[in-house]
Image (tube, rainbow, N blue to C red):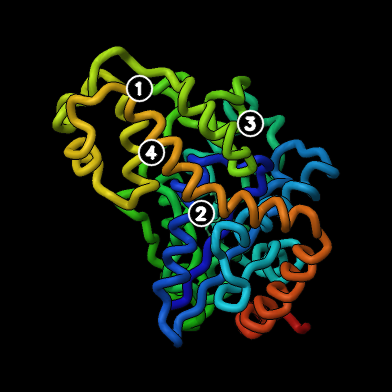
Amino acid sequence: MRVVSGIQTTGNLHLGNYLGAIRNWVRLQDSMGADDTCLFFLADLHALTVSIDPATLASNTIEMAATLLAAGIDPDRSILFNQARVPAHSELAWILGGTARVGWLNRMTQWKDKAGKNREGASVGLFTYPVLQAADILGYRATHVPVGEDQKQHLELARDIATKFNLDFGVDLFPLPEPMIPEDTPRIMSLRDGSAKMSKSDPSDMSRINLIDTDDLIATKFRKAKTDPEPLPGDLAGLAGRAEARNLVTIFAALANEAPQSVLDRFAGQGFGQFKPALADLAVATLGPIRDRLVALLDDRDAVGTTLARGAAKAEALVRPTLLAAQRAVGLQV
Ligand code: TRP
């Protein structure tokens, strides 16, 4: 298996990011055999497709890398790097830009959503974003790409580009990558509103557990989380119409590595006065060590940068032969 995935560089990661994406990467890394390779990168080039503040982008990249390391990505077992340090991504994206069709990109829902009504004013990069993503994947001849449901269409596009490139140039260069979409990924909602996703852009900090939060803050946020006066039900059906209650059960189950039903088996009939402290203790026990590692890494940002540079050198060695083969296939003299 050759696993490749990228993550957008945002600051201030929270519990939803951890349980929704980062933890899946760590588990995947931990399940790899000796002949498998995992490449994980920070998509800093993709960040340029919307308006950015340069200083923020630079610090987000380091903070995101520190978060991944703190969460358990091991740079000796996985190749961790930032996209911008491996120029082959950009070089291959340009070549694949000759293969991708405007009509294909026009159908991308992420493009339609992000450009909205103002397509004329959107950046060209936002439009060609999925071509760069295809280069990220195809450059490593990836077999598997762990992504969220929302990236399925971009994966399909990468497969279409690979197929057309192989066909047009009579080569067998790019294998078709498979998306890996974990079925049991929990959707973590705001602690203040069970119908909204936990988000870093929510103005209320009480709505989310940040991975950098202290133990006390974690406990306070769970204590103050919105709930209802009913006790916990004995089965999942009893959580219908109780979005906040369901969210806390979901979080408990995810942190405990249990099914939500087994959490209900344990807490059925108890009120939130009992459940919330148990949840806070569990969260502190699982997230506390990650936070401690994160704080230490953020104290030595240069070391994080060095780790990324080492990962980039390994990535470069893997991607370069594919880029050369692509250049040769299309007749570039380089
Ligand atoms: N577009 C992906 C996202 O928003 C991030 C990404 C960039 C990616 N390049 C990738 C994911 C390559 C998988 C493979 O989540």
What residue do we see at 77% from left, 39% from top? 52
The disc, 3 or 4, on the residue closer to the chain's N-terminal end is 3
Residue carrying label 2:
22
- Residue 34 is situated, as x and y percent measured from the top left of the image, at 45, 86
Ligand 1: which quarter? bottom right
Which amino acid type corresponds to the residue marked 2 in the rendered image?
A: Ile
Report the residue marked by disc 4.
251
Q: Is residue 279 above or below residue 105?
A: above
Q: CA distance from mark 3 to mark 4?
A: 38 Å
Instruction: Give the residue number, with chain letter if any, for mark 3.
Output: 119
Q: Amino acid at mark 4?
A: Ile
Q: Residues within 10 Å of mark 1 (few under 14, many from 20)?
A: few
Q: Amino acid at mark 3?
A: Arg
Relative height, residue 255 to residue 35 (above, below): above
Q: Nearer the viewer, mark 2 or mark 1?
A: 1
Horizontal and vertical percent position of residue 157: 47, 56
Quadrant, the N terminus: bottom left
Which amino acid does the dot numbered 1 rest on?
A: Gly
Give yes or no for contact between labels 4 and 2 (Cβ–Cβ under 8 Å).
no
- In percent of the image, x 44 and y 57: which residue is there? 24
Residue drawn 79% across the image and 42% down it: 56
- The count of marks equals 4
Residue at x-position 61% and y-position 78%: 76
Give residue 273's mark. Answer: 1
Please indicate, yes or no, whether residue 158 appears anywhere in the rendered image.
yes
- Where's residue 173, x and y in %? 51, 81
Mark nearest the camera among 3 and 4 is: 4
Q: Earlier in the sequence, mark 1 or mark 4?
A: 4
**Tag in front: 4 or 2:** 4
Distance Cα–Cα, label 1 vs label 4: 16 Å
- The part of the image, by quadrant, that contains residue 88 is bottom right
Q: Secondary structure at mark 1?
A: helix
